[in-house]
Image (cartoon, helix red, strand yellow):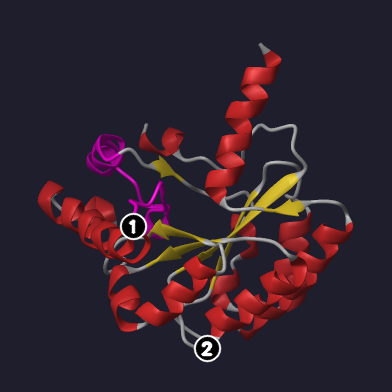
Amino acid sequence: MPHSMLIHEVNTNRRAVAFTFDDGPHPVYTPQLLEIFRESGGKATFYVIGEHLERYEEMARRCVEEGHELGNHTYTHPYLSKLGAEECRLELVRTEERIEALTGRNPATFRPPYLDFDETAASLTKERGYAVIGAVNMGAEDWRQPGVEHILQATRSTVRSGSILIFHDGYGAREQTVEAVRILAAELSAQGYELVTVSELLASQAVAGERSR
């Protein structure tokens, strides 16, 4: 099944977690998140939508310049299972090309909108070499603005070494998300967690695997 391809966490000996943000970049909320990670010394992964990337390219450039990772989140945020193979391919490729033009390299990871992922999408992402990323704290549902305390409680219970955490900086008011992330980043840093990109977390899995042999 395609959903078995989704990586929600990484088996690693490293005390690290990956914060991820979907649907940006956004001219108001993305800069606030960048400030949080400057203060914490951590890095994050931003799953950008191609049409937003074109509109706010300078914002995306700031993410890259500050050491964060851009991941592919399609061009228009569709349900991939409702698209034909060529439409699905274009959703990936158009955003991929925008990210490559900005960073000089292809994005390494992909998150399907709504985590909607079928055999066609699975085949295309495998063909293009993507790691397909989910998250452990889906119950936080920050996208529906359930309150800062709900986001915090639903996330704290999922955190351990190797966790991938999902939040949103695009599509709607994200003040609750920003405040929750501000609290979580400080808490986790104080607990000795490194805040790293998804690619860095995935690389730590490979290292751990080598050490265990």
Q: Can residue 85 be seen in this view?
A: yes
Q: Is residue 24 visible?
A: no
Residue 113 horizontal/vertical position (percent): 38, 59
Left or right: residue 157 versus residue 163 is right
Q: What stretch is highlighted in magenta?
A: 104-128
Residue 169 horizontal/vertical position (percent): 52, 75
As for residue 105 lying within the magenta part, the answer is yes
Task: Name which quarter of the figure residue 36 lies in.
Answer: bottom right
User: In this rendering, is residue 189 above or below 3?
Assistant: below
Q: Residue 28 carries which label?
A: 2
Quadrant where the N terminus lies?
A: top left
Under tag 2, what secondary structure? loop
As for residue 146 lying within the magenta part, the answer is no
Q: As shown in the figure, which amino acid type bears the numbered disc 1?
A: Gly
Residue 94 horizontal/vertical position (percent): 21, 61
Left or right: residue 24 versus residue 173 is left
